[in-house]
Each structure stands twice: as C-alpha cells, then as structure tokens.
Image: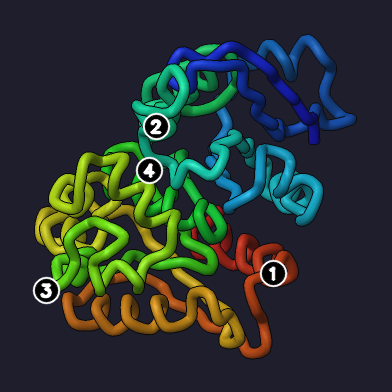
Amino acid sequence: MSLLRFNFQSDCLGNNTEISVILPDKPMTEKPAEFYGSGKKYKVLWLLHGTFGDHTDWLRKSNIELYASEKNLAVVMPSGLNSNYVNWPSFATGYRAWDFLFDELMPLIYGWLPVSDKREDNFIAGLSMGGNGAMQYAIGHPEKFAGAASLSNAPSDLSLMKAPGYDGSAEGEAMKLFNKRVQNVVDNFGGLENYVNSVVNVWDKLPELLKEGTLPKLYFCCGTEDKLIWDKYVKFKAYAEEIGLPAAFEEFEGYTHEWRFWDLTIQRALDYFGL
C-alpha cells in the first residue's frame, strides 16, 4: 500500500492538523501511466482513534495497512484530539470536530484523491471514543455511509441524565456519577437539554431511522473483560433487541480495552461490511 501523511491548515479545527491515508498500490503487472491515469475510485474506510490518540494510532498499533491491502481499500485516519468528535466553539478559536469530517475532510479526500464519494463505497469505524464518533457521524448522516462499526463502545441512553438531582453543577448529587469529561462536554453544549438533543444522542435517533429504513449496516463489539465499556455495551445490546435493530453484536472472551482486540475486530467489521 501507499501511505500519505498530510499536514494542512483546517478551517473547521482552527489550526494545522494531520491525517494519514492508506491508498492501494500499483500492481507490478500494470504500467504507471495506466494505473495512475485510470480514474478508478476506491472504496474508503474513515477510521477514528480513541481518547489520547491521533492519526498515527491505527498505523502504529494495528495491521490496518495489511488488511486494507488485502481488500484494495483506501483508509483515511484523521486526528481529533480528545474532542469526542463534536464541535467545541469555546475552545481556542473554535474546534469544530463534528463539522470537520463532512465540511472539510470529505471534500478534500474526494476532490484530491482516487476515492469514491458514493454511499455504497463509504464506511466508518472507530475504537472507544472513535466508536462513539463513528456512530454519531453515521446516524447523523446515514446517507453518507454504507456501514459503521463501534469497537469497544456503544450508544448511551442520555435521558437517564435527566434524573432528579442532576442540575448540571458539581454540587448535584447525580453529577457524582459523571466524570469531568462528561461535565465538560455537557457544558460545551450549553447545558443538559442541549446535550441530550445534540448529535451525540444516537440512542434516541435509532428507532426513527429504523422506521425510515435509512440505517447503514451497524457492527458493535466488546471484550468481556473490558471494565470501561462492558455494562454500557450490554445495556445497548438489550435496547437494540427491544427495538429490533438489525445490527451485528460480538463479544470476545478475555479481552479488555486493548489493541489486540481492536486489531482483531476491525477485521471482523470489514468482513461484516462485505469488503
């Protein structure tokens, strides 16, 4: 495969940012002019990192380049800080991580590289924070993606945050259930009501999209020893069964929140997508 590392100034993120892109290599049997001038557009996987990561994570810690090579697949890996892949207007000059994919990165990739913009050729996946991001993007714009995978994560029922005692402040008794990160993102949206009604609320959007028949293929997985995610995953799986969500769920014995698991399950997701 060919590997592109691209640094550019982003309007949406308000600073320079970097992406890594895997592109199919020229076969030895083809001449350069024929291959590079063919006009072929490749299927693409938009692949998101987790908390504390960046655009190099998947390249350094998994075999994604090998899997992409086997499937003749382009892979685009952006950096998203610890943003939860949502917009943070109050950060610095504004850091619009949600807008970045649709308003900037997709036009860049589709316009400059041999990548297809057709829905049936676009897939999105991520691990942990990136799993949430993948679902937010796919459910927010189901017309963009044929499939979405959340590795070691799952949507949450945000209505539970409206329980009595939650007042959005550090003094509220229910606030003790949420870490500083959740407090920050709720504040970022201007309060709990706005947060629950935002792009992060995948849970409540699923029944409507299911009724409309517009959902991408969805894949969820979790390791049985993943203390961070297991309970959340189990609750979402039960909810999915309740609403009749046609998604794939896989659990793997002995795995925690770890790269061996994500290297395994990204292969499972690609197979599930039919790539």
Q: CA distance from mark 1 to mark 3?
A: 36 Å
Q: CA distance from mark 4 to mark 3?
A: 38 Å
Q: What element does badge 1 sit on?
A: loop
Q: Which residue is mark 3?
A: 164
The three-letter code of the residue at mark 1 reads Glu
The residue depicted at 76 percent of the width and 56 percent of the height is 62
Q: Position of residue 18 (x, y in %)?
A: 66, 25
Instruction: Nearest to the eye among marks 4 and 3: give it.
Output: 3
Instruction: Nearest to the eye among marks 2 and 1: give it.
Output: 1
Instruction: Nearest to the eye among marks 1 and 3: give it.
Output: 3
Q: Which residue is mark 1?
A: 258
User: Sequence order check: which comes first, mark 2 or mark 1?
Assistant: 2
Residue 234 in sight from this viewpoint: yes
The residue depicted at 48 percent of the width and 57 percent of the height is 131
Residue 145 tag number? 4
The three-letter code of the residue at mark 3 reads Pro
Q: For this view, does 48 lie left or right of residue 123? A: right
